[in-house]
Amino acid sequence: YDCKVLESSAAAFAEFKPTILIELCEYTLNAQGDSIRDIFKLLLSLGYCGYFDNGEPIPAVDDVLRIVGAHTSINGVFRPV
């Protein structure tokens, strides 16, 4: 339910600008009718930029989708720009 929690917290993120650490796992998001793309769309619209957990910027959501495929996940860090 990560995407739904993020959506319902959007006003707080816009106001307080916390750093967000989230597991990016396509198959678990899909089970709830969501996608990694939905998370990126929401957080980018709130002025956040994504980073891999090693600190490298995530160039595009497609890069994450290639990494996680259908059966794995990675951690993403989102910080306000």
Image: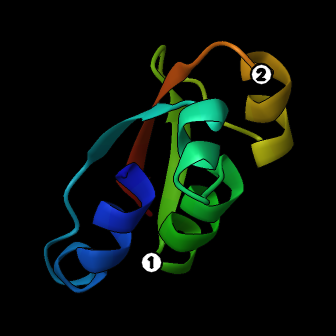
Amino acid type of the residue tagged 1 in the rendering? Leu
Q: Residue at x 16, y 78 (%)?
A: 12
Residue 38, by quadrant, is: bottom right
- Work out how far the residue at label 2 is from the one at label 1, CA to CA, in angstroms: 27 Å
Residue 56, can we see it?
Answer: yes
Amino acid type of the residue tagged 2 in the rendering? Ala
The answer to which of marks 2 and 1 sits earlier in the sequence is 1
Q: Position of residue 11 (x, y in %)?
A: 23, 86
Q: Which mark is residue 58?
A: none
Q: Position of residue 72 (x, y in %)?
A: 63, 13
Q: Residue at x 85, y 41 (%)?
A: 62
Q: Residue at x 77, y 18 (%)?
A: 67
Q: Which residue is mark 1?
A: 46
Q: Which residue is mark 2?
A: 70
Q: Nearer the viewer, residue 51 or 64?
A: 64
Q: Is residue 71 left or right of residue 66?
A: left
Q: Where is 66 relative to 26, above or below?
A: above
Q: Is residue 2 left or right of residue 44?
A: left
Residue contact between numbered discs 2 and 1, judged by CB atoms under 8 Å: no
Q: Is residue 19 left or right of residue 66?
A: left
